Image: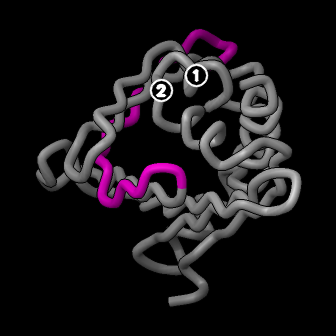
Amino acid sequence: MPNSTLTLRRHIAAPPAAVWRCWSEPHLLMQWFAPRPVKTVEAVLDVHPGGRFYTAMVLPDGSEHPSEGCFLIVEPGTRLVFTDCLLAGFRPAPKPFFTADLTFTPTPGGTDYHVRALHANEAGAKRHAEMGFEQGWGAASDQLAALAATL
């Protein structure tokens, strides 16, 4: 279902290994994962298939938004797939929303960073777009790029 997929692509001026670290090390992920002024205040990354992917974000109004999921595919330095459709240990989640498929491809001067947000249907993708997928993931990707360039 092509209309159920949102995409984002960026060139990051850092090697794939640095971008990978930003996705796989909790202390690094917390620095960039939420578009400012939202803050990621907790991250649990058990980076292996079936491992836990948990984040908690706090909005400027003080409300906290936890997100629980699991990793599906882990190819260090090249590909990372996670979902909130399943919890750690591949247990079904009560309110599935999407799966993220991330690739990190070496390019001259850095990394081609490609995000595909996969939804069950077009309505789910539309909802995610209306929530600000492009702006939010775009801003977070810029923050990721800035951090990765320092590693």
Classify residue 111 by image quadrant: bottom right
Residue sitting farthest toward the top:
62
Is 66 magenta? The answer is yes
For residue 14, what is the image quadrant?
A: top right
Q: What number is the disc on residue 92?
A: none
| Magenta run includes residue 79 | no
Q: Amino acid at mark 2?
A: Glu
Q: How many marks?
A: 2
Q: Amino acid at mark 1?
A: Leu
* Disc 2: which residue: 25
Which residue matches tag 1? 28
Disc 2 crowd rating (10 Å Cα; few below 14, some 14-19, many 20+) is: some
Tell me which secondary structure the magenta stretch mostly adopts. strand
Q: Position of residue 146 (x, y in %)?
A: 82, 30
Residue 31 position in % (x across, y down): 64, 19
Residue range highlighted in magenta: 59-77
Q: Residue at x 46, y 70 (%)?
A: 119
Q: Nearer the viewer, residue 60 or 25?
A: 25
- Counting from the top left corner in percent of width and height, residue 133 is at 68, 54
Instruction: Tell me, yes or no, whether the two marked residues, 1 and 2, touch with CB atoms within 8 Å.
Output: yes
Query: What's the residue at 60%, 85% (across, down)?
Result: 3
Q: Quadrant of the C terminus?
A: top right
Point 87% across, 52% down: residue: 109
Q: Position of residue 18 (x, y in %)?
A: 65, 37
Which residue sits furthest bottom? 1
